[in-house]
Amino acid sequence: SEAQGYFIQSFFKNFAEDGQRPGGSPRPTFNDQVEAKSQRGPAPTEKGCRSNSSSPDRSGPYLDPVMGQTEEDVEAMCKDNGGIQGHHNSCYLDATLFAMFSCTYVFDDILTRAREEADIPQYDEIQKVLRDDIVCTLRRKKYVPHENVMRLRELLDSLGGVSGLTTEEKDPEEFLNSLINALHVPPFLKLSSQQETHLYQLFVAKDERLEIPTVQQLFHQSIHESKIKLNEIPKALIIQMPRCGKQFKLYDYIVPSLELDITDALENSPRFCYVCGRLATHECWECFRADVGLEVTSYCQSCSDTVHKHHIRDKHQPAELKHDFGEGRQPRRQFMRLFAIVCIETSHYVCFVKCPVKNNNYKWCFFDSMADREGGEDGHNIPKVEQYMDAESWLGPKGVKKLQDMNSASRNKYLPGKTRRLFCDAYMCMYENPLVMKYK
C-alpha cells in the first residue's frame, strides 16, 4: 500500500541518515557531539596489525587472514575460550562482530580506510581498536578478551549517539548504526527510491501460501510490496528478518537461503522471461506470487500477451521495461552468497558463520560469547566456537523439504537444538557477492 511504502522509505532514510532523536528533535552531527579528542592514549598495536608507518610497502594497515580457510584451521578455531568473550550484556555486539569479520573479508575496508577531513576526532582510535584489538586478535589468536571489546564500547558510548552501549542490552542494528556513523562507512545498498542504506529490513505481510518461507521468498515479497528495487549489485547485503526483537515473529520458521537470487530485484538489469526464458521486455507486478518470486513478473512481449489473455489476468496492466539492453544482450542470474546468520533467543544473541574452506568445501560454525560461566557473579563468561555438523542436511532446499514433511508437533520435538535456533531465531542474514567485493 501507499502508506506501507512511505513507512519503508522512512525506515531506510532514518537508518541511513540517523536524522532524528526518538523525541523528534534534530540529532547533532558526531563532530558537534564531541568537543575534544579522548584523553586516553591509543590501544597498543598487536603484532601482525602493522600500520603504514611500519609497513611502507603496503597501501594500508596489514590485516590477518580470515579464519577457517582449511579444515585444520576450522578445528583450531572450534574450542572453549574461542571467539569473543562476552561481558555486561555484550552478546549483541560479540555475535555481530564475529559474523562480520571472523571468516569473510567483505567488511575489511572499514578497518583500512585512511582518515579524511570530515571524520570525527576519534576516528583513528575507534578504527584502531576495532582493527587491532578485536579483528586481528580474533583472526590470529582465535580469542578476544572482553577488555578489548569494552574499549570499543566505551569509545562508541562516549559519542552519545546510542546510550548504554557499555552496560545495557541492545540490538545489533543499534551497534551497527553507531559504528557506521562513527567510521562514516559508505552505504552498502543503493535503492531505486534514490535512498542509500546499510541494512535491508524485510517489511512483508504474512502470506498464507508461505507456511515455512525462505529468506529468498521473503526478500522478493518485500521488494514487491515496497516497489523499491536495488539500483546495483551490492558487495554486502544485511537482511533483517520480519520480527520485532524477541517479542514478535511473523513466522515461526524461516529457512535461510544459501544463495539469494537478486536478478529480478535489480532495477536496471536484463531479466529472463518467466515462460520462455528469453530476454524479458515487460513487467507485471500484479502477477507476483510470494511462493514463486519476482521472476513470475517478467515476460517477453509474446508471452506477456498470451499470459494476460487468461481471465484471471486479463485485467492486469503489464508495463514495458524502458531499458533497452539490445537484442543480443543475454540475461544472467545474479546471486549473493550467505556467509553468516545472527540469531536471538529470549535476550541472547549468537551467530552461525560459514568457514571459507578451499575448494568450496564449506563448513559452518556456531559461536556463543557466553556459552558457559566460571566463578558465579564475580566470575567471567566462557565463549565457545563449535562446528555446526547438521548444516549440510538442514540448510537450503533440503531443510525446507524436511520441515514441510513434519507436522508442527514433530518440528518442535525432533529439530536438533542448533537447527531450531537457526530456523526459529534468525535475526539477521548476511550475504556477500565475491565478484563485486573485489572491485569495491
Image (cartoon, rainbow, N blue to C red):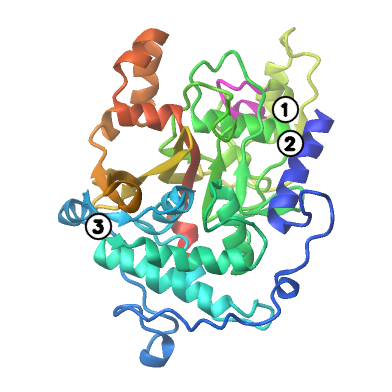
From where the camera sits, is residue 299 visible? no
The circle drawn on residue 285 is: 1
Residue 439: image x %, image y %?
A: 50, 66
Magenta-highlighted residues: 288-299
Q: Mark 2 or mark 3, which is nearer to you? A: 3
Of the pair 266 and 183, the residue shown nearer to us: 183
Disc 1, SS = helix
* Residue shown at the point (45%, 72%) measured from the top left: 129
* Residue shown at the point (33%, 53%) measured from the top left: 378
Pointer 2 residue:
227
- Above or below, comparing residue 38 to residue 68 in the picture: below
Q: Mark 3 or mark 1, which is nearer to you? A: 3
Of the pair 52 and 283, the residue shown nearer to us: 52
Q: Do the residues labelled 2 and 1 touch (CB within 8 Å)?
A: yes
Disc 3, SS = loop
* Residue shown at the point (28%, 59%) measured from the top left: 67
Q: Mark 2 or mark 1, which is nearer to you? A: 2
* Residue shown at the point (27%, 67%) measured from the top left: 140
Q: Do the residues labelled 2 and 3 touch (CB within 8 Å)?
A: no
Q: Mark 2 or mark 1: which comes first in sequence?
A: 2
Q: In this view, does 88 lie to the left or right of 30?
A: left
- Above or below, comparing residue 272 to residue 26 in the picture: above
Q: How far apart are marks 2 and 1 (CA)?
A: 9 Å
Q: Mark 3 or mark 1: which comes first in sequence?
A: 3
**Residue 289 lies within the magenta run:** yes
Residue type, mark 2 in image: Lys
Q: Distance between the residues labelled 3 and 1?
A: 43 Å
Pointer 3 residue:
69
